[in-house]
Image (cartoon, grey):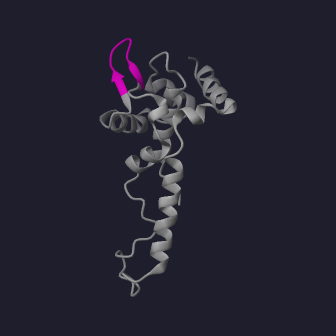
Amino acid sequence: MELTYYTDFALRVLLYTAGYPERRVTMREIAGAYGISQEHLRKVVHRLARHGYLQTAQGRTGGMQLARPAAEIRVGEVVELMEDSLELIHCGREPCPLCGACSLKRALDAARDAFLDHLNQVTLVQLLEDPSTAEQVRRLARQAGT
């Protein structure tokens, strides 16, 4: 299973934003730090703001910051929000003779659920408690000229 870039970017935006709780960060700053197109980020930021993860402000002093404490934002919930589908196999796409009585589908669904359960135990704060992660987020901002 591989997460989409959309989800990857969302997690990076939240992690970066959580690394700077004392100020608003800009899309330009995040785009520069990660080498990502601002257009790609715009869609991600819009969805995160619409679902209560980010507060955004426009204008000269604009930018974004977390709308909730980083300790309350769980990685798994962000993955579930951003991914269009978490199905590992699509039994109905090409009808399978095992459909409805398949232990493979049940096993894969159980594995996916365990994956999400694990990610739902991890918060942004916990990720930033790793000194190397926190330092790398700071280094990205310095490299981007912030």
Q: Which stretch appears magenta?
A: 55-65
Q: Position of residue 37 (x, y in %)?
A: 47, 35
Q: Residue at x 69, y 32 (%)?
A: 132
Q: Is residue 91 above or below residue 121?
A: below
Residue at image point 37% right, 36% down: 48
Taking the magenta stretch, the answer to whether it contains residue 64 is yes
Q: Quadrant of the C terminus?
A: top right
How far across and how far down the image is residue 121, in percent? 52, 45
The image position of residue 13, as x and y in percent, is 48, 33
Q: Is residue 22 left or right of residue 133?
A: left
Q: How many marks?
A: 0
- Coordinates of residue 2 in the picture (x, y in percent): 53, 57
Does residue 6 appear in the picture of this structure? no
Is residue 146 among the parts visible in the rendering? yes
Q: Residue furthest right?
A: 132
Q: Residue at x 51, y 27 (%)?
A: 18
Q: Residue furthest top?
A: 60
Farthest bottom residue?
97
Please name the residue shown 53% across and 61% down the image.
1
Quarter of the image for residue 58 reads top left
